[in-house]
């Protein structure tokens, strides 16, 4: 398909809106929550550890077979399996964000942590259904465009819309009011869900409805749980499958360390939250949007593997810019340079990464396999980056050293990717 036609499609608009709904909840419990917790006096180490509330994003492959198999009764019959899961998750997220607005972290930190953990679980469940709908709805030759639209939407929800909360600190009296107002942003996702068309169901987890319960359970376990994992290893071979999984685990570790502590860093060098929104969220969103659409074009032109290699090198190099900012201190020109270049390369690399793991999936087991691969990437970023605040404290607050180390963290993943390319592991060639 021609590049210009790939981006002008109703399905691409739907994926964009659902991307907003996917990114927004995580933004509210990660970067925006970091600002709230900083105002509440949490240490760097504690702030980094609080990032573990997003662990469900890294583990959603464990319940992906359920989302891949069950239709949710009358709601599933009315909307279809994928759309039913998406809409139910969105309604729950609105309620949970409203509930979060009732609590104060300095007085009820445990309750805030539990609610954020539940938000992450429901949001991760929504992601399973959204990713499956994206892959199943769009032909292989449009996956780069679909990935671009989804990631641009995700970034818009995660950075700009969730970032509006930072701007609202200058207008509203408390973070509680801000979270109450921001819960309405989930309406973007509801619109996308209602506009979407249910894709054809290709899963194998069914079985006869009149079969005995034990037989149905055995068929479900075989079709929805074991078969997707067996198929992935059989198709790639055990050695190649293990290397692929290792690469996905390691690829964006440096970016995760930087991202976890970036909000705290901006504040420590003298920026107010409204300024962070104006400089980082707004300018960063524009750069991410351009980078994301370019990432889709790169994936279409170069293929997912080589596009990912180019993007990964650029992403690692731009992490070094933050060391420059740490040395200069508050400097608007340097900040904008860092934000624009970092977010541009981040957008390119994210699109290339999404396209890469999408191409690794067999469409017969879309939700389970994609959730497994995406979860492995999230697992590495979430668990290891929880120590980012501790690392800054260990370095005595020497942010410039911390950022140099985040750039070095990209090297192992890039070396593995080179090995995969040289050994012919190019998922875009499989096109299942």
Image: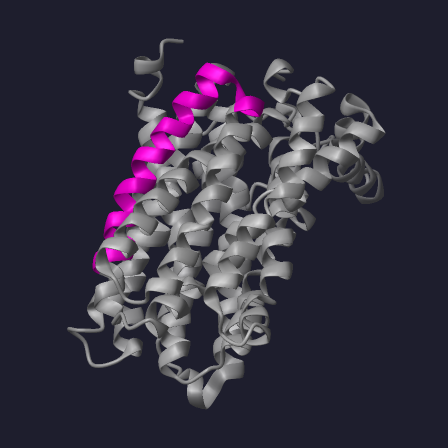
Q: Is residue 115 left or right of residue 14?
A: right
All told, the count of numbered labels is 0
Q: Quick one: 366 or 6, which is closer to the camera?
A: 6
Asked if residue 123 lies in the magenta stretch, the reply is: no
Q: Which residues are magenta?
A: 278-306
Please tell me which residue is depicted at 52% across the width and 18% down the height of the picture.
303
Please tell me which residue is depicted at 82% across the width and 40% down the height of the picture.
212
Residue extending furthest top? 1
On the question of residue 413 being in view, the answer is yes
Q: In which image quadrant can residue 176 be found?
A: bottom left
Query: Where is residue 357 drawn, in percent x and y?
Result: 59, 32
Please tell me which residue is depicted at 45% across the width and 63% down the height of the picture.
30
Dominant SS type (magenta): helix
Is 425 above or below relative to 293? Answer: above
Is 351 above or below relative to 404? Answer: above
> What is the quadrant of the N terminus in the image?
top left
Q: Quick one: 347 or 19, which is closer to the camera?
A: 347
Q: Is residue 91 left or right of residue 370?
A: left
Residue extending furthest left? 171
């Amino acid at each position: 398909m021609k590049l210009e036609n790939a981006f002008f499609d109703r399905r691409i608009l739907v994926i964009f809106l659902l991307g907003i709904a996917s990114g927004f909840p995580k933004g509210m419990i990660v970067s925006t929550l970091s600002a709230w917790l900083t105002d509440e006096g949490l240490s760097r180490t504690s702030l980094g550890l609080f990032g573990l509330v997003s662990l469900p994003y890294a583990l959603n492959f464990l319940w992906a077979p359920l989302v891949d198999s069950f239709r949710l009764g009358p709601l599933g019959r009315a909307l279809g399996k994928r759309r039913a899961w998406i809409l139910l998750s969105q309604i729950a997220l609105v309620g949970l964000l409203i509930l979060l607005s009732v609590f104060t972290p300095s007085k009820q930190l445990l309750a805030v942590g539990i609610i954020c953990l539940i938000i992450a679980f429901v949001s991760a469940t929504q992601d399973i259904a959204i990713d499956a709908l994206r892959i199943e709805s769009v032909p292989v030759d449009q996956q780069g465009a679909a990935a671009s639209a989804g990631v641009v939407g995700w970034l818009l929800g995660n950075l700009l819309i969730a970032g509006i909360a930072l701007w609202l600190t200058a207008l509203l009296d408390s973070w509680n009011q801000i979270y109450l107002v921001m819960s309405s942003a989930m309406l973007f996702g509801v619109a996308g869900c209602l506009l979407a068309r249910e894709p054809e169901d290709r899963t194998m987890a069914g079985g006869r409805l009149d079969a005995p319960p034990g037989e149905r359970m055995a068929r479900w376990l075989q079709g929805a749980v074991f078969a997707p994992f067996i198929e992935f290893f059989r198709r790639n071979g055990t050695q190649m499958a293990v290397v692929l999984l290792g690469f996905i685990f390691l690829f964006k570790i440096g970016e995760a360390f930087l991202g976890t502590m970036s909000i705290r860093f901006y504040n420590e060098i003298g920026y107010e939250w409204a300024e962070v929104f104006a400089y980082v969220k707004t300018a960063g969103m524009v750069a991410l949007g351009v980078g994301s659409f370019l990432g889709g074009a790169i994936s279409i032109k170069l293929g997912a593997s080589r596009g990912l290699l180019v993007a990964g090198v650029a992403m690692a190099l731009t992490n070094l810019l933050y060391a420059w900012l740490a040395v200069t201190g508050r400097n608007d020109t340097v900040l904008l340079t860092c934000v624009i270049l970092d977010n541009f390369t981040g957008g390119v690399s994210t699109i290339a990464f999404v396209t890469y793991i999408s191409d690794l999936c067999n469409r017969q087991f879309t939700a389970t396999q994609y959730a497994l691969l995406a979860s492995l990437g999230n697992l590495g970023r979430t668990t290891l980056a929880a120590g980012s605040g501790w690392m800054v404290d260990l370095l005595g607050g020497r942010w410039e050293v911390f950022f140099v180390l985040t750039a070095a963290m990209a090297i192992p993943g890039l070396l593995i990717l080179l090995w995969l390319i040289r050994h012919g592991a190019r998922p875009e060639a499989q096109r299942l």
